[in-house]
Image: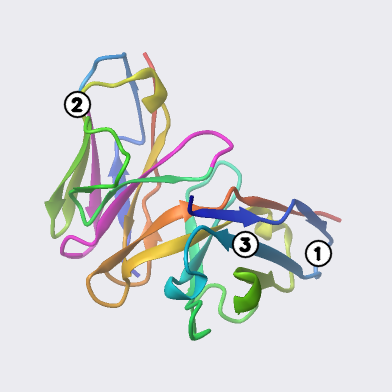
C-alpha cells in the first residue's frame, strides 16, 4: 500500500496567518491527492481534489498544489473556523489517508 | 441537497456483528459508489472499501476483506456495511461517503460524508 505522511503533525497559528501543510506519498501518485478538513465530532469535509481543484463552496483562501510525491495545502489567511485537523488522501491505488495535521490557536 | 444519513450508535459484545446503514438523498443513488471509512478514537481515517451502488460490485481493503460485507437496497437508496467477529479494536466511528471521480483511473474523492456511526465493542 502507498504510505502517506504529513508535516507538521500539529501547528499553532493565529487568525490571519498563512498556513502550509505538507503531504508526502511513498511513491508517485500523479495528482491523485485530496485534502479534507475535520472538526471534532464531525465528519470530514472535502476541500481540494485532484491536488489543486477547489471543491465547490470551499473558500478561496484554501489552495492545493503538487504532483508526484509531494503536495501542499495552503490557507492564505487563517480564519477562526479553520481551526481543525486536516487530512490528505491518495486515490492512486488502494485508498489511504495521511495521519493528519491539527491546527490550533497560538 | 445531497445528504447521507447513517443509523445510530451501537454497542456490541466481542465476537458479535454490527450493521450500519447509510441512506442517500438528493441525488441518483445508483450513479455513485459508496465508500466506508472508519476512525478509531484519536486516530486517522482508515478506508474499508466501497460498493458500486448501481452494479453492487464491491472492493475491500485487504485488512477487512475476510469479515466485512457491503450491500445496498436500491429501492430505498440505502447502503449497508456489516462487520463480523468484532473485537475491542473495532471500536470506532464508521462513516459512509459518496464517491466522485473514477477511483480506478483518474482518481476519486469523497463528498459528502455521512454523520458517522459510533460502534463500541465492549464486554
Evaluate whether residue B16 shows in this view: yes
Q: Nearer the viewer, residue B19 or A96?
A: B19
Give the residue pinned by disc 1.
B14
Compare marks 1 and 3 and give the one earlier in the sequence: 1
Q: CA distance from mark 1 to mark 2?
A: 47 Å
Discs 3 and 2 carry the same chain letter: no
Which of labels 3 and 2 is toward the front? 3
Q: Is residue B54 left or right of residue A89?
A: right
Discs 1 and 2 carry the same chain letter: no
Q: CA distance from mark 3 to mark 2?
A: 36 Å
Which residue occupies 50% across, 53% down? Answer: B113
Q: Is residue A37 magenta?
A: yes
Q: CA distance from mark 1 to mark 3?
A: 27 Å
Give the residue pinned by disc 2.
A76
Chain letter behind tag 3: B
Which of the 4 image quarters holds residue A58? top left
Chain letter behind tag 2: A
Magenta-drawn segment = A19-42
Counting other residues with Cα less than 10 Å from the Cα at mark 1, is it few (<14), some (14-19), or many (20 or more)? some
Q: Position of residue A26 (x, y in %)?
A: 24, 61
Give the residue pinned by disc 3.
B23
Amino acid at each position: 500500500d502507498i504510505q502517506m505522511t504529513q508535516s507538521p503533525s500539529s501547528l499553532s497559528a493565529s487568525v490571519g496567518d498563512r498556513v502550509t501543510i505538507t503531504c508526502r506519498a511513498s511513491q508517485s501518485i500523479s495528482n491523485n491527492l485530496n485534502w479534507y478538513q475535520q472538526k471534532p465530532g464531525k465528519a470530514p469535509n472535502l476541500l481540494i481534489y485532484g491536488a489543486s481543484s477547489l471543491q465547490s463552496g470551499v473558500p478561496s483562501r484554501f489552495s492545493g498544489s503538487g504532483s508526484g510525491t509531494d503536495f501542499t495545502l495552503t490557507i492564505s489567511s487563517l480564519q477562526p473556523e479553520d481551526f481543525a485537523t486536516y487530512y490528505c488522501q491518495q486515490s492512486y491505488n488502494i485508498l489511504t489517508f495521511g495521519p493528519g495535521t491539527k491546527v490550533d490557536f497560538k | 441537497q445531497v445528504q447521507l444519513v447513517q443509523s445510530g450508535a451501537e454497542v456490541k459484545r466481542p465476537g458479535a456483528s454490527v450493521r450500519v446503514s447509510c441512506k442517500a438523498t438528493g441525488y441518483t443513488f445508483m450513479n455513485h459508489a459508496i465508500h466506508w471509512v472508519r476512525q478509531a478514537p484519536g486516530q486517522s481515517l482508515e478506508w474499508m472499501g466501497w460498493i458500486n451502488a448501481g452494479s453492487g460490485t464491491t472492493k475491500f481493503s485487504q485488512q477487512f476483506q475476510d469479515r466485512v460485507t457491503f450491500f445496498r437496497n436500491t429501492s430505498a437508496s440505502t447502503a449497508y456495511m456489516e462487520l463480523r467477529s468484532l473485537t475491542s479494536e473495532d471500536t470506532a466511528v464508521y462513516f459512509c461517503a459518496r464517491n466522485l471521480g473514477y477511483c480506478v483511473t483518474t482518481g476519486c474523492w469523497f463528498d459528502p460524508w455521512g454523520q458517522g456511526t459510533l460502534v463500541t465493542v465492549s464486554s
